[in-house]
Image (cartoon, coloured by chain):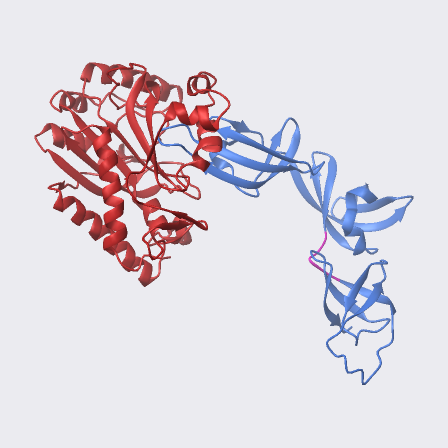
């Protein structure tokens, strides 16, 4: 369980996150967390709730608000993912998600840099930072100075693995190599954006204009930890429907119920160019509060009540 | 059957017909990707370490493991004979299978024998055993080196360090996990 001191730091960080977005003209939204339908994602398993589902992310509802005319929105909310439990995973976790119409994924990368720098400079007494404002994690010093490193996923495979990203996908070894051979090296001098994912690994992201097998998706890594996932949103409803059909096929093979989120696809038609990103708040808290386990920064670890 | 999401430290699973205990476990999941269950385990028969990464749809059989309370009867020609205290069935284990447990094993001691199917594969002793000191230097009263220890031999032939006041014929309690002296036992 958290101490009053770390709860205060958590509270100050939450407030600083909100100020950051208010100062940039974002609207804070709080959408329902219990929903009758979710976006079909084969590798994310939802909890059911009296016939409905607990959200695995607020993406569906937030994109509906954007389609309704909002330009810039953010949300701090709890999300639920079944069977995700480990050192850096909790089945219930806090997500920060934000969207900006008219932007693409590179704009979001810059905004991530700004967000972390503001958090590190505005919140005093964070145990995870040294006097210069660098993150100190697992005994190493990570500078938040801009610009952060950018590494394409394909180059990361060339650099750290002995097979290419495409070969890894074909052999169903993509996740294994990413987790074991690439991620541990990422973001130890300064944060790294891993970008341009093969399109089959980016169901909701926009395809790159100049290379149709890649999607405009990125992940942010600091100290080997994956902290955020962002992309230029796929806004072509017909393409999105095709991708969902594929995902739904994979989900049905796992004997899980799934249906097409029709209202979401209708909303997509009205979205226009938009970029969006989801950031794992608990992991960021863990880094900034100088801890190495998620359970050390959760206000309450519910497992003690079992 | 267990599925990958049941994996955790201490769980016992069966792979290729042999029982394994999980010694280290880490869940990982790259964003939006498949979950990976990175697992280190030890073969419960050979002791060999082994690591592997599993996926959500991997399944594992439960090994047929049963612990039975047995009494140590006697040793003969390197075979150590035990009797099931409920069924009176007798089995024997080799010196190699018993390993360090031999340091503490005396006639009539009750132990837990782990069976994999019909095959005895491991023995757990009580955490604390009382053994008689058979060889000890006498305690020189007035010895000022009160904090020192001295070596003694117990009835199994095992040697350990004890406080200087322990004498030949005393019974002492030993922690079988560490082989260290705990206290002198009054009878």
Q: Is residue B184 left or right of residue A285?
A: right
Q: Looking at the image, which residue is at 21% across and 23% down? A: A261
Q: Is residue A101 left or right of residue A95?
A: left
Q: Is residue B13 magenta?
A: no
Give the farthest residue toward the right. B77
> Which shade is chain A?
red
Q: Is residue B164 above or below residue B119?
A: below
State which quarter of the image contains the N terminus of chain B.
Answer: top right
Q: Nearer the viewer, residue A10 or A218?
A: A218
Q: Is residue A248 visible?
A: no
Q: Which chain is blue?
A: B
Residue A167's x, y, as percent?
Answer: 46, 17
Q: Residue shown at 84%/63% (left/top)? A: B154
Q: Residue at x 21, y 25 (%)?
A: A233
Find residue B21 and report its image quarter. top right
Residue extent of the magenta highlight: B125-129
Q: Nearer the viewer, residue B186 or B140?
A: B140
Estimate the x, y position of residue A135 in percent, counting from the top left: 36, 49
Q: Nearer the viewer, residue B182 or A138?
A: A138
**Residue A124, image x, y percentages:** 27, 59
| Residue at image coords 87%, 76% | B138
Magenta region, mostly helix, strand or loop? loop
Look at the picture and state if A293 lies above or below A156: below
**Total count of labels:** 0
Would residue A168 be seen by someone viewing this image from the given angle? yes
In the shown orientation, is residue A39 left or right of residue A91? left
């Amino acid at each position: 369980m958290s101490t009053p001191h770390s709860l205060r730091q958590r509270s100050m960080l939450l407030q600083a996150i909100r100020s950051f977005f208010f100062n940039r003209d974002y609207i804070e939204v709080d959408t329902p967390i219990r929903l009758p339908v979710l976006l079909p994602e084969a590798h994310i398993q939802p909890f059911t709730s009296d016939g409905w589902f607990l959200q695995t992310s607020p993406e569906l509802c937030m994109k509906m608000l954007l389609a309704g005319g909002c330009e810039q929105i953010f949300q701090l909310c709890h999300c639920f993912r079944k069977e995700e439990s480990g050192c850096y995973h909790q089945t219930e976790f806090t997500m920060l998600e934000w969207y900006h119409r008219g932007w693409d994924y590179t704009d979001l990368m810059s905004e991530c840099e700004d967000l972390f720098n503001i958090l590190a400079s505005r919140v005093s007494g964070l145990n995870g930072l040294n006097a210069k404002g660098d993150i100190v994690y697992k005994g190493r010093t990570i500078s938040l100075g801009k610009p952060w490193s950018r590494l394409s996923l394909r180059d990361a495979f060339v650099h750290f693995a002995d097979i290419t990203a495409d070969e890894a996908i074909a052999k169903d070894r993509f996740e294994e190599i990413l987790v074991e051979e690439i991620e541990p090296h990422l973001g130890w001098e300064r944060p790294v954006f891993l970008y341009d994912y093969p399109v089959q690994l980016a169901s909701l992201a926009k395809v790159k204009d100049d290379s149709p097998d890649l999607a405009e998706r990125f992940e942010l890594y600091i100290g080997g930890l994956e902290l955020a996932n962002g992309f230029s949103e796929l806004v072509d409803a017909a393409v999105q429907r095709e991708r969902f059909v594929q995902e739904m096929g994979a989900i049905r093979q796992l004997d899980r119920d799934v249906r097409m989120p029709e209202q979401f696809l209708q909303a997509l038609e009205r979205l226009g160019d938009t970029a969006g990103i989801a950031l794992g708040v608990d992991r960021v808290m863990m880094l900034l509060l100088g801890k190495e386990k998620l359970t050390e920064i959760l206000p309450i670890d519910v497992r003690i009540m079992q | 059957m267990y599925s990958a999401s049941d994996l955790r430290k201490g769980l016992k699973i069966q792979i290729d017909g042999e029982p394994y205990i999980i010694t280290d476990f880490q869940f990982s999941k790259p964003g939006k990707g498949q979950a990976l269950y990175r697992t280190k385990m030890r073969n419960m028969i050979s002791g060999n370490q082994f690591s592997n990464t599993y996926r959500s749809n991997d399944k594992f059989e439960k090994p047929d493991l049963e612990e039975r309370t047995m009494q140590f009867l006697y040793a003969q020609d390197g075979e150590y004979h035990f009797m099931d205290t409920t069924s009176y069935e007798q089995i024997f284990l080799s010196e190699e299978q018993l390993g360090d447990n031999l340091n503490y094993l005396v006639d009539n001691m009750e132990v837990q024998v782990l069976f994999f199917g019909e095959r005895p594969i491991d023995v757990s002793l009580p955490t604390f055993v009382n053994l008689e000191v058979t060889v000890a230097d006498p305690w020189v009263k007035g010895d000022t080196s009160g904090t020192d220890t001295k070596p003694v031999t117990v009835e199994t032939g095992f040697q350990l360090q004890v406080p200087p006041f322990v004498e030949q014929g005393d019974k002492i309690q030993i922690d079988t996990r560490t082989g260290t002296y705990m206290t002198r036992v009054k009878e």
